[in-house]
Amino acid sequence: MTGAVTLKSVISRFDPAAAIYDYTVPARMPWSGLVRKGQHVRIVDVEGQQAVDTLFYRAGNYAERYSAQGTLAAQGSAYIAAGTHILSNEGNVMLTMAANTCGDHDTSAGACSCEANTVRFGHHTRYMHACRENFLVELAKYGMTKRDIVSNINFFMNVPILPDGDLAIVDGVSKPGDYVELRAEMDVLCVISNCPQVNNPCNGFNPTPVRVLIWDATNN
Amino acid sequence: MSETDLYRTPEQYRQRYLELKSRAQEANARRPSGRNTANPPVLSRDLVVEEETIPVGWYWTRTIARGRSLRIANDHATAGVSAFFWNAADTSERYNAGDTVKVQWSARLSRGRVLLSDMGRVMASITDDTCGAHDFVVGGSTRSGDRRKYGTMARENPDGRNTHENFVLAAGKHGLGLRDVGPCITFFAPVHTDEQGRFVWQSGAVKRSDYVDLRAEMDVIVALSNCPHPLSPDEIWRARPVRAIVWRSAAPAADDLCRTATDEAVRAFENTAAMFVG
């Protein structure tokens, strides 16, 4: 099976000055917003090596949501990269990765949580802020709950799956200003946790802000 | 220094992470290979609570009491049996694919490893496994994926049965729905990831009469789907019946492999035990 993904850097032609939305998500905080069909949403890793845990839901029917496994099965490869069609649990294309300046992005390792932290790093890490805390608070604004948290995309997070099955979060490859950009193929609710984890290298052990920009379809 | 960790420096966090990683990878490297388990290869009739043959394309769902085991018997080497799990006492707690692989530092899980919920608890232990080639990353079949792979009307599967819809159906029988179906496991699906990140199906890794034993570590609702894996090399839709056998397994011993194999497993079982106190 051959995928459309490419390891090459794909640059966006959009000018930040023309964006209709431009917001900097502080370190450790959540964000959510509607991205309409045809619009482009860009996530900028402002200082580099910052994981951005991201979920997508169909606007108007949140039961249809991102499917990590459906996306990987369709492309036949293990990472999100330029050209990846981001599929829903109903098999529809939600977004397409239109630009990407920094290699492969994980979608198999999920989001950190207080409970998983106890297992991974010790019971003393329970009371440290975590992505699923961010997701719960942000999803609650839309009437959603823990049931609605599925495997997410971890933009800028580097988790190689080796041929022997070994899997580990390793140092991110994103440099300050690297970005990913997605074209919405349907109206989608985008929910982000700007990852607060300091127990593994996903944020360079130092969580930092990220920037979200949206361009209108009419700018295409 | 206190145990709060909150005041550590980035460099101290890094050192600690690298220590955890090297300990876990050593544990993974010395995981048992041969079959050395108390589970009987043939289950005597007095051990069996229920045995069901799942027809090709179909699903099966049951609540399995804590301490009992489920054997998935792949008598005819079918290319994948998908599985999903909910905590029967609180179905918002369910199998978590990401935690299961990252906590155990491996996407190739077999005997001696555990299936984790989203709440840092063990739902089931893999107490025996004659195959060792399962997919914890790619998941199960979907209607749209099967259409791409086999064409609009696969003659062998005229109803278009697929794992995603089977899980929606299984969820429905417990009053659950689409929101309750998440990323799953597919047993007997030998998918590897090559150096370029491409998935590779390792033909021949699934043998006739292979089986997997899962011991329930809480009361779990299990859903199984007998549909071929989306990456199986068959050009036509092809599946074979499998058996689901619920059986009375022995209580775990103090040195139970799944409970003692790694520091992570020990902590996950501590979280699980806390649910049953009082």
Image (tube, rainbow, N blue to C red):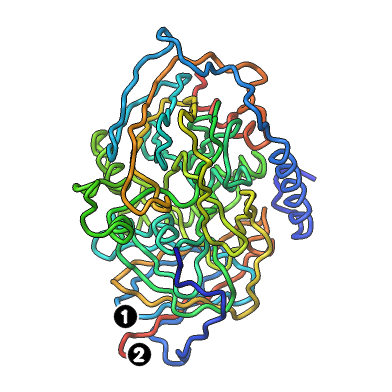
| Quadrant where the C terminus of chain A is found in the figure | bottom left
Residue B135 on image: x %, y %? 49, 45
| Quadrant where the N terminus of chain A is found in the figure | bottom left
Q: Secondary structure at mark 1?
A: loop
Numbered circle sitting on residue A24: none
Residue B56 on image: x %, y %? 29, 37
Q: Chain of mark 2?
A: A
Apparent side of residue B53 relative to residue B269 in the rendered image (left or right): left
The type of residue carrying mark 1 is Gly
Residue B122 on image: x %, y %? 52, 33
Q: Which residue is mark 2?
A: A220
x 42%, y 87%: residue: A19
The type of residue carrying mark 2 is Asn
Badge 2 crowding class, 10 Å Cα cut-off, few under 14, some 14 to 19, many 20 or more, is: few
x 36%, y 45%: residue: B228
Q: Nearer the viewer, residue B131 or A106?
A: B131
Q: Is residue B138 above or below residue B39?
A: below
Q: Is residue B63 above or below residue A153?
A: above
Q: Which residue is mark 1?
A: A38
Residue A183 on image: x %, y %? 38, 77
Apparent side of residue B170 relative to residue A48 in the rendered image (left or right): left
Confirm or deny contact between disc 1 and disc 2 (CB under 8 A).
Answer: yes
- Image quadrant where residue B112 sits: top right
Q: Chain of mark 1?
A: A
Q: Earlier in the sequence, mark 1 or mark 2?
A: 1
x 42%, y 52%: residue: B233
Residue furthest to the top = B46
x 76%, y 50%: residue: B16
Q: Secondary structure at mark 2?
A: loop
Decide if residue A62 is in sight here.
no
Decide if residue B120 is in sight here.
yes
Badge 1 crowding class, 10 Å Cα cut-off, few under 14, some 14 to 19, many 20 or more, is: some
